[in-house]
Image (cartoon, rainbow, N blue to C red):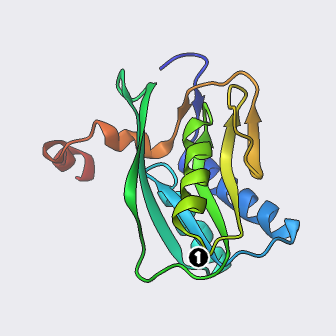
Amino acid sequence: MSAKDLVVDWDEYHRLVERLALQIHESGWHFDAIVCLARGGLRVGDILSRIFDRPLGVMFTSSYREQAGRQQGAIRIGEHLCSAAELPGTHWLLVDDLVDSGQTLGEIMRVLLARHSQLREVRSAVLWQKAISVTRPDYVVEFLANSPWIRQPFEAYDTLRPESLRDRVS
């Protein structure tokens, strides 16, 4: 961990998601469904889906695979949007935890509009936007001018393996 890292615990993480929900609500924009980007946006999407009582879809993407997930490689986008039923409506909210370079968010916005012809508008919402981003989300809780590495509370599970759980849970 670097001294420049932004370390976020679960309580702060949940407060950020709640602030994001309030920001979206106060904007007055109405949407029919939420699409979250897996993996980082899963928790954000789940909570917002519950707060707004909207159906949730999941889009699988991957780009941070190099150098233990710290360097962006080629963007991979899943072929299908996963949900229990077809997502309704013409206005969707796309959510993720953060926008770093902005390349993934920008590409997903284009892909959603190209693959789902019924869509008239897709807006994006994130907890953090780094200054280096080339894409500007519609809703952002925190703008990070120094573009730190964000240490999110669920990252503890990246190195935790089943054989270590006995000591952890006892």
The residue lying at 58 percent from left, 16 percent from top is: 3
- Picture layout, residue 7 above or below residue 89: above
Q: How many marks?
A: 1
In the displayed structure image, the side of residue 163 where residue 150 appears, left or right:
right
The residue lying at 76 percent from left, 25 percent from top is: 145
The x, y position of residue 51, in whole percent, is 65, 75
- Picture layout, residue 132 above or below residue 121: above
Category of crowding for the residue at label 1, using alpha-carbon neighbours closer than 10 angstroms: few (below 14), some (14–19), many (at least 20) = few
The x, y position of residue 165, in whole percent, is 20, 48
Which residue, given by chain and number where applicable, does mark 1 sit on?
A: 50
The residue lying at 48 percent from left, 48 percent from top is: 40
In the displayed structure image, the side of residue 137 where residue 50 appears, left or right:
left
Location of residue 143 (image quadrant)? top right
Location of residue 9 (image quadrant)? top right
User: Is disc 1 placed on a helix, strand or loop?
Assistant: helix
Q: Amino acid at mark 1?
A: Arg
